[in-house]
């Protein structure tokens, strides 16, 4: 540590020393010096904050964390991307692999990310892409809008306090949090490449941040097709009719949206089980919206799947919505009124299936476009007008480590069945 850093460390409370990482562990430019303590921190953390989230709260939170900890372990995502930060730090940790102090920090490392669901998903994706042998678990601070991820793991959904006391209270929860696995879901979209001299294209007009064009060398590419890929942790939805201005609140079809096609008219839907067998999924004609859900937290903490009672589990081979079982829950809605059932006790949508993979093949001429949404990010997808095709496939793509509090609503398949509360209703069509 530099002399200034050593002085700051000496003045820290014993509690804050549990999280402090010395500069030489974070950066190759910093030379190691005699440690004030030979004992590695109990819960070393890296903090990533979206300074644009929550109005001024993000910037205030950065200032507080940098005051309490080593400012080099706190990162503003508006200034530096998490992939570059983590690649640099893990390269340095590899360089220090024979340093016992640094090695123990690597083994115990945790990440705190403050922002909306998009920010949290960004960090989860970056950590997954690094393919670390011991990936750090992630705690999520609800900041701004769309805080389904923090809520699902017990961190709440209200913006946090930014003062010293509030931050120390959050750090206390981090040190006592349990680790949980969460499934990662990959989305692959293929559209027919436009013919030469043609202005027509089925490519999205504006891609969400979580979806990008595949590189030419990508093995998923097919000749004469444009391939897009991305990932989500919470949900993918199809068929929701929205416009840019009400996105913050509109989650279901507007009540006057009588012209919206049902899903059966738009696409052929197939699902694949864990054994690799594909089957057609019957979609009732009344269903106009589908949500493929990974977490029991949607649109502000609602749970569209609910928990099927034991009889339903036997009769339809359904399970509770575990976040680490390699299955995604597929739920249908008829209209906006149907969505309101989620506000009632034990309310849920129409349970269509659970699957390891799901594929949508859009029919020519059914509509000019479909509305899609992934972890809160919407886009308007052009659909084929002739013999061209648009295909969207969702598949399980590994797992990540989350930190969860005792208020966590997400359930693991390895938990005792006694912790699971069942829905009492018998009508899946509600």
Image (tube, rainbow, N blue to C red):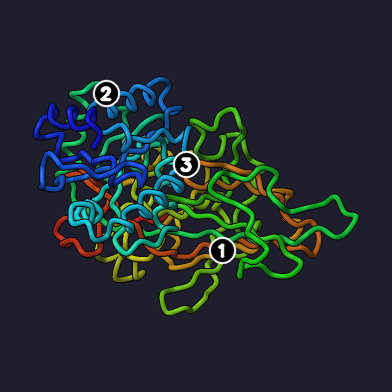
Along the line of sight, which residue is nearer the eye, 319 or 428?
319
Q: Which residue is mark 2?
A: 161
Single out the residue that lies furthest toward the right. 197
The CA distance from mark 1 to mark 2 is 40 Å
Q: Position of residue 405 (x, y in %)?
A: 20, 44
Q: Which residue is mark 3?
A: 81
Q: Residue at x 59, y 62 (%)?
A: 360
Res. 430 in view: no
Quick check: marks 1 and 2 in contact, CB under 8 Å? no
Mark sitting on residue 393: 1
Ranked by sequence position, the earlier of labels 3 and 2 is: 3
Out of 376 and 426, give the one closest to the viewer.
376
Residue at (75, 60) in percent of width and height = 364
Q: Nearer the viewer, residue 24 or 13?
A: 24
**SS state under label 3:** loop
How far apart are the two marked residues, 3 and 2, measured between alpha carbons? 25 Å
Q: Earlier in the sequence, mark 1 or mark 3?
A: 3
x and y, in percent, of residue 111 in the image: 30, 45
Q: Residues within 10 Å of mark 2 (few under 14, many from 20)?
A: some
Q: Position of residue 370 (x, y in %)?
A: 65, 49
- Inspect this view and state whether residue 154 appears: yes
Is 17 displayed left or right of 58 in the figure? left
Q: How many marks?
A: 3
Badge 2 element: loop
Q: Residues within 10 Å of mark 3 (few under 14, many from 20)?
A: some
């Amino acid at each position: 540590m530099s002399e200034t850093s050593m002085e700051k460390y000496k003045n820290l409370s014993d509690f804050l020393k549990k999280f402090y990482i010395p500069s030489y562990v974070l950066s190759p430019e910093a030379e190691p010096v005699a440690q004030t303590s030979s004992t590695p921190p109990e819960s070393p953390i890296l903090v990533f904050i979206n300074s644009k989230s929550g109005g001024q709260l993000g910037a205030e939170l950065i200032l507080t964390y940098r005051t309490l900890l080593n400012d080099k372990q706190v990162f503003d995502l508006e200034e530096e991307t998490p992939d570059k930060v983590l690649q640099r730090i893990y390269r340095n940790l590899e360089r220090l692999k024979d340093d016992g102090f640094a090695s123990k920090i690597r083994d115990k490392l945790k990440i705190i990310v403050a922002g909306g669901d998009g920010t949290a998903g960004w960090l989860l994706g970056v950590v997954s892409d690094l393919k670390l042998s011991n990936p750090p678990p992630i705690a999520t601070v609800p900041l701004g809008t769309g805080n389904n991820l923090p809520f699902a793991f017990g961190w709440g959904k209200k913006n946090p306090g930014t003062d010293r006391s509030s931050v120390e209270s959050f750090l206390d929860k981090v040190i006592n949090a349990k680790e949980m696995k969460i499934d990662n879901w990959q989305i692959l979209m293929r559209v027919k490449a436009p013919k030469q001299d043609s202005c027509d294209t089925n490519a999205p007009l504006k891609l969400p941040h979580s979806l990008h064009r595949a590189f030419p060398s990508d093995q998923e590419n097919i000749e004469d097709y444009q391939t897009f890929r991305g990932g989500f942790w919470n949900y993918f939805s199809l068929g929701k009719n929205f416009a840019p201005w009400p996105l913050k609140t509109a989650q279901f079809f507007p009540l006057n949206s009588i012209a919206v096609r049902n899903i059966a008219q738009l696409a052929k839907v197939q699902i694949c089980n864990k054994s690799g067998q594909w089957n057609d999924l019957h979609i009732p004609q009344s269903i106009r919206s589908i949500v493929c859900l990974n977490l029991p937290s949607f649109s502000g903490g609602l749970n569209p799947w609910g928990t099927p009672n034991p009889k339903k589990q036997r009769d339809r081979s359904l399970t509770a919505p575990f976040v680490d079982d390699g299955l995604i829950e597929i739920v249908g809605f008829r209209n906006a009124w149907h969505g309101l059932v989620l506000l009632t006790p034990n309310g849920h949508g129409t349970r269509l299936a659970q699957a390891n993979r799901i594929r949508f093949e859009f029919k020519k001429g059914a509509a000019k476009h479909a509305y899609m949404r992934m972890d809160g990010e919407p886009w308007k997808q052009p659909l084929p007008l002739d013999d061209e095709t648009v295909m969207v496939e969702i598949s399980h793509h590994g797992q990540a480590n989350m930190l969860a509090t005792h208020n966590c609503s997400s359930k693991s398949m390895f938990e005792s069945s006694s912790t699971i509360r069942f829905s009492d209703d018998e009508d899946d069509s509600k």
